[in-house]
Image (spheres, grey):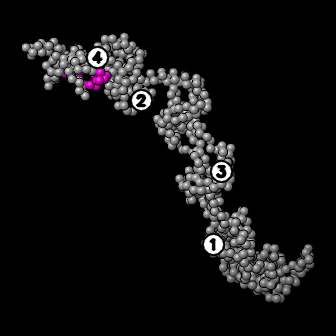
Amino acid sequence: MQELLAQSSFDKLKEGTIVPGIITEIRQNEVVVDIGGKAEAVVSASEFMDVGDLQIGQQIEVFLEKLEDKNGNPIVSFDKAEQKKNWDNILQRFPEGSVATGRVKAKVKGGLIVNIGVDSFLPASHIDIQPPKNLDQYVGQTYDFKVLKINLERKNIVLSRRELIEQQRAEKRRNLLESIQPGQVRKGVVKNITDFGAFIDLDGMDGLLHITDMSWGRITHPSEMLKQGEEINVMIIEVNREKERVSLGLKQTTKNPWDEIDRKYPVGAKVHGKVVNLVPYGAFIEIEPGVEGLVHITEMSWTKRISKPSELLKVGQELDAVVLGIQKEEQKISLGLRQLEPNPWDMVRHNYPIGARVRGKVRNMTTYGAFIELEEGIDGMVHVSDMSWTRKVNHPSEVLKKGDEVDAIVLDVDPAQQRISLGMKQLASDPWSDIDSHFRVGDVVQGTVTKITSFGAFVELKDGIDGLVHISQISEERVEKIKDVLKPAQQVTARVVKIDREERRLGLSIKAANYSADQLAAETATYEMLNRQSSGSDMMNLGDILDEAAKKE
């Protein structure tokens, strides 16, 4: 009889209709419902707003999707029954533009499915002001939504959460712009980070926090100080109500460390810091957050020749330094490293007194002289004019080469300018001071050709004294090109015909070297008249006579 009654009730069930049922069991993930069929139906617990509100024996309505599945069990849905009932009055409950509360059921392609009594579609672009990357975080959450569009024929509803948020933000923006004032400190959330700063959500509108207003110290990128989503306190610096723009400051919420900089770091004080940047002209040292000093490359060492700061320092290195100067208004501090050590130049006058004989190595040469390294970092300079008593040195390479060990005499010391003047010729007496004891006009001398010019040849004699043989004094025959007659390093015999003390040079004559005493006397007698007619009281010397003779030829 019971089977017949059940069969009778089963015959009344029709697929696609809403049927009543009795809850017979409530499990963790499902609810068992008796709809009068051959077997009980199972409804997923996720279809109910709150399973805790259900009771065994409670009557509910479900939508019968299928009388029997392959196992003979009916397939029903509580959610679809509710939606089918709700579609009848959806226009009255939620007309377009109204606000509906709904729960996110699932993620689908392009957005989310939201139950507001019926399943509705929430496009991803309408979930928030910025489309989220992860939609899973919204599943199971309940929000308010704005009904954008209803299509009854297709039974489609499109929702927007973004428009509600934008409306709320617009209202908050208006209220914020009315109340906000420069100097106020407000809470905000880091919304976005760029290379030039960060946009801060002030709960109503965004403000720009420029990188220069983030820290009193040095930062290269805003991400060094801020993280997206972080809550911070910022100061309102400027408000433009017409353009609805707000400029913010983070460093302004703390005291400017430069306000009392001269009291904290007086000139001469020793400080400790960290290298934060290296530039061609020096290194920046952070001595506290927001305070950096510059060690110029010239203040890094008393003696080491540093061409670039990276030879001595590296970024991140901690070190001590001495305060050399403060420019408070420009927020600049000059620091020194070499001041931590005694200045070796303070002892230069003691170690290298004037007149002392010293020895060193040729470190470098310039057009005007050679630098001699006396000790590490201490150089003396020998000017070309102090290299030889007898030779006119045009370039130091004529006498020296790099790396040579040389002796010299200290001529002058200037510790302030870090200069030591040296002389090489001062090691010996000046042969020109008593040249007459070495050479007289008429002497026959031996020498070596050292240099050929267009007008004559230079000949080195004893004691390093140079003589010049004019082109007219090389041969009795006319000489067109000296190099055709004389060669460098050639040994020659000549007669001294002039002694030029002012130019510190001897005039020589090769052609007169073999003149006999009679020939010389005849030449002299021939030009005695010229001697008497000369304007000076000194008699014309042999060189002048020979020069005149050359002109007559």
Q: In the image, which residues are magenta?
A: 41-53
Q: Are marks 1 and 3 in contact (CB under 8 Å)?
A: no
Query: Pointers 2 and 1 in contact (CB under 8 A)?
Result: no
Asked which secondary structure carries label 2, the reply is loop
Question: Left or right: where does residue 539 sit relative to residue 136?
Answer: right
Mark before the other along the chain sequence, 2 or 4: 4
Inter-mark Cα distance, 2 to 1: 74 Å
**Residue 496: quarter of image:** bottom right
Q: Secondary structure at mark 4?
A: helix
Which label's residue is closer to the chain start, 3 or 4?
Answer: 4
For label 4, the residue is 82
Cα distance between the residues tagged 2 and 4:
30 Å
Q: Are marks 1 and 4 in contact (CB under 8 Å)?
A: no
Q: To which quarter of the image does residue 396 belong?
A: bottom right
Please say if the residues under marks 2 and 4 sit with CB atoms less than 8 Å apart.
Answer: no
Cα gap from disc 3 to disc 4, whole angstroms: 77 Å
The residue type indicated by label 3 comes to Tyr
User: Which residue is labeled 1 in the image?
Assistant: 361
Q: Which residue is mark 2?
A: 131
Residue 432 visible: yes
Q: Secondary structure at mark 3?
A: loop
Q: Nearer the viewer, mark 1 or mark 3?
A: 3
Alpha-carbon span between mark 3 and mark 2: 52 Å
Nearer to me, 232 or 335: 232
Q: Residue at x 67, y 48 (%)?
A: 263
Is 478 rendered above or below residue 184?
below
